[in-house]
Amino acid sequence: MSSLMHFDSTFSFEKSISVLKEVVSHFDGDADVTSCLVEGDWARIVDLSTDYLVGSDLSASEDVTNDILRVKRRRQCLALFSKNASLPLHVDRSGVALHKFLESEAKCLATNRRFRNRSLPLNQGGLDAALVYQVQCKIADILGPFPGVDGFDYGFGPGANIGLSRFTSIRRKLSASPTCTTAAFKYVKYLKQSCPHWEELNHLTRADAGKYASVPKNAKTDRSILIEPMVNSYLQKGVGSYIRDRLTRFGIDLRNQKNNQDLAYQGSVTGEWATIDLAAASDTISKEVVAQLLPIEWWLFLEDIRTQSALLPDGREICLQKFSSMGNGFTFELESLLFFAISSVIAGRHVSVYGDDIIVPNSTAPAVMEGLVHFGFEVNTEKSFWSGPFRESCGCDFFRGYSVRPCYVKGLLSVKEIFRLHNFFVRSGEQAVAELLKKYIPARFLIYGPDGFGDGHLIGDHELTRNAKIKRRGYAGYTFSTYVSTPLVTSDSLKGDYAAFLYNAASKEACLFEKHCRGSHRASHLNFLGRCEFADSIPSSSMYQERGGTRYKRRNVYTLG
């Protein structure tokens, strides 16, 4: 390896695959995976799956242990490749994503037509009027009365917007010329009054179409998103926060995945719970479904602030049949609201939802899935589980009560990635695999430390180094070395710096307020500016340093041990 190699420098494809092959061979050479590796059949290896029902006689405890180990190791072998974008599949992942996006549009169009045609008999795909009415009532109960345009906690999200894609910090958003759809333009007057420091609102640019883009998802396809106009995104974020708070009152906490994870664990042990996953969930929220299920005032406002058309990579502009997609600031909360309302009406109160991760009592699963299909959604049968000993939800995978969540490799390996793999295998009890990975780490990178401080060092026995300065001050702890990410920063001066300072200060105040009044209405971040106690304090340009890339440096960390 080159002496110029850095902590995050990637290996060659050949070297990366040789490391992964050695990991597979350690797990007794999983036959299917080994065959694919020998033949270089990357297309087949990413399509392999795990059979959770094939096993030995589970009456003996030893058989149960072997079955768990079989599933855990099989999943780990597959995880080394299923999301690995470096595999030479010769697949246009962005093209596949676009094709799926347009397929979802066709499904939404069919759903929209079906919901408009109320005369269609139920046995021909017509509406179940009673179910629709019950879901309408449930959603109205959750949302409550429309709070008015000034009743939302608007704010900026972290993502790109039309007209601003490279750096997406708050200061750059407040310095750029804002973009806005024609339908949302009526709310700019309100924003100018409530956000007087957002001076660039006076230089508004109309942008009626969201810009289609895709981001990495797995080895076979990317994920479709729409880049939204900035003002729309700002308004959408406020609606999303409001729906999130309202759902909390009904036992659905979208700030915490633990409830779903706990139920998935219980389901894998008792079979009491079913975990349901939907295919392209956000892309199949059709316009007519939202129009019929939401109270009229809510629907009118969301209709105004959503993006109603999309600009495709080939320059075509299409009118969207879906109501919103990934990239919209309220899509996650809206889909959670819809799936919770539909599931709870059918299954009763014992329902947990986090996005499209839905958990219902096992006995009600068939009826809930049928109800979701009725509203135009498609159940992903490969990732939904209502029989057998396996359940998965919110990043946790359980087989007979044991975690079998693997460590995924998403590209070429590096020292940084091998650190992560090593530590994962140490934590999961696969010490032998962790040891074999260390031979691929140059000696100058070998540093050890305790668990619980990330993956910038290898978990293992380490020296207890006491810094002289720490000792003189009477501290009893010690230091160890680890690699930490250090952002490369820019510190240029922008015209939106002062407004960004006020926005961030108001955000901190709002967070403190929320701790005391969680779930209640909170003031808008920029509404806070008029009362902000820091408003007369002009910050220096050094406070506006922002991330422009990342590098890794070795640092000493203090701990009590």
Image (cartoon, helix red, strand yellow):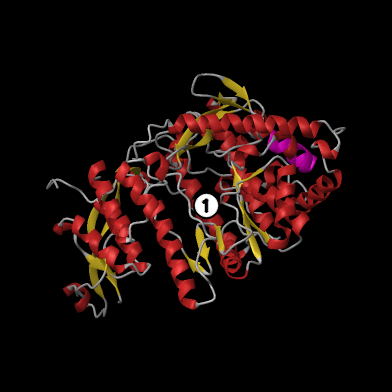
* 118 or 436: nearer the viewer: 436
Q: Residue at x 47, y 66 (%)?
A: 403
Q: Residues within 10 Å of mark 1 (few under 14, many from 20)?
A: some
- Looking at the image, the residue that sits furthest to the top is 315
Q: Residue at x 61, y 66 (%)?
A: 267
Q: Quadrant of residue 105?
A: top right
Q: Is residue 443 left or right of residue 149?
A: left
Q: Vertical placement of 439 versus 148: above or below?
A: below
Q: Quadrant of residue 290?
A: top right
Q: Vertical placement of 70 versus 317: above or below?
A: below
- Looking at the image, the residue that sits furthest to the left is 3
Q: Secondary structure at mark 1?
A: helix
* 268 or 420: nearer the viewer: 268
Provide the residue span drawn in magenta: 291-303
Residue 354 pos. (x, y %): 60, 54
| Amino acid at the residue labelled 1 | Ser
Q: Is residue 385 left or right of residue 200?
A: right
The C terminus appears in which quarter of the rendering? bottom left
Q: Is residue 486 left or right of residue 139?
A: left
Is 294 part of what is drawn in magenta? yes
Q: Vertical placement of 4 versus 453: above or below?
A: above
Q: Is residue 221 left or right of residue 101?
A: left
- Looking at the image, the residue that sits furthest to the front is 57
Q: Quadrant of residue 291?
A: top right
Residue 171 pos. (x, y %): 44, 40
Residue 411 pos. (x, y %): 34, 44
* 438 or 476: nearer the viewer: 438
User: Mark 1 = which residue?
Assistant: 507
Is 175 part of what is drawn in magenta? no
* 66 or 319: nearer the viewer: 66
